[in-house]
Amino acid sequence: MQELDLWSMIFVFMLATFIGFEVIRNVSRLLHTPLMSLTNAISAIAVVGSIIIAGEQKTPFTTVIGAVAVFASMTNIVSGFLITDRMLKMFKKRGAQK
């Protein structure tokens, strides 16, 4: 299997970024909370993978990239839960909030 060169990987990353942005932007508000829960599950898988990469310590570069990936994934999970909680509070009755 031939390895991808840097420009091919950058192209795929940019294409995924634009497509992901368009897909998320056009999601109905009613689907936002279930979609965030799915995103949190995917990010949890990314945390496990990035911990493995950071823990291998093959080179300093892969260790740093793995640590950055752990940080980014954990930030995504925590903010996803905060946003989901905030959106679920919108559907509670005013007197039921504590």
Image (cartoon, grey):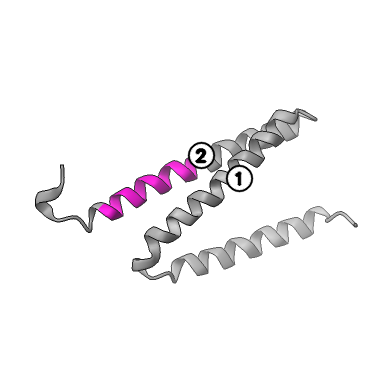
> Which residues are drawn in magenta?
74-88
Q: Where does residue 70 sit, x and y in percent of width and height?
A: 59, 37
In terms of sequence position, does the residue under pointer 2 or pointer 1 come before the other?
1
Q: Where does residue 25 sit, x and y in percent of width and height?
A: 45, 67
| CA neighbours of label 2 inside 10 A, class few (<14), some (14 to 19), many (20+) | some
Looking at the picture, tell me which residue is in the foreground, 5 or 88.
Answer: 88
Amino acid type at mark 2: Met
Residue with the most extreme right position: 1
Asked whether, in this view, residue 70 is left or right of residue 34, the answer is right
The answer to whether the residues at label 2 and label 1 have Cβ atoms under 8 Å apart is no
Count of numbered labels shown in the rendering: 2
Q: Residue tagged by mark 2?
A: 74
Q: Residue at x 39, y 66 (%)?
A: 31
Asked whether, in this view, residue 84 is left or right of residue 73, the answer is left
Looking at the picture, tell me which residue is in the foreground, 37 or 4.
Answer: 37
* Secondary structure at numbered mark 1: helix
Give the quarter of the figure containing the C terminus.
top left
Q: Residue at x 44, y 54 (%)?
A: 37
For residue 46, the mark is 1
Looking at the picture, tell me which residue is in the foreground, 22 or 90.
Answer: 90
| Magenta residue check for 84 | yes
Vertically, is 19 above or below 92?
Answer: below
Vertically, is 28 above or below 82?
Answer: below
| CA neighbours of label 1 inside 10 A, class few (<14), some (14 to 19), many (20+) | some
Vertically, is 57 above or below 80?
Answer: above
Q: Main secondary structure of the magenta part?
A: helix
Q: Where does residue 84 sit, x and y in percent of width and height?
A: 35, 51
* Secondary structure at numbered mark 2: helix
| Magenta residue check for 76 | yes
Amino acid type at mark 1: Ala
Q: Residue at x 41, y 45 (%)?
A: 79
Q: Where does residue 15 sit, x and y in percent of width and height?
A: 65, 65
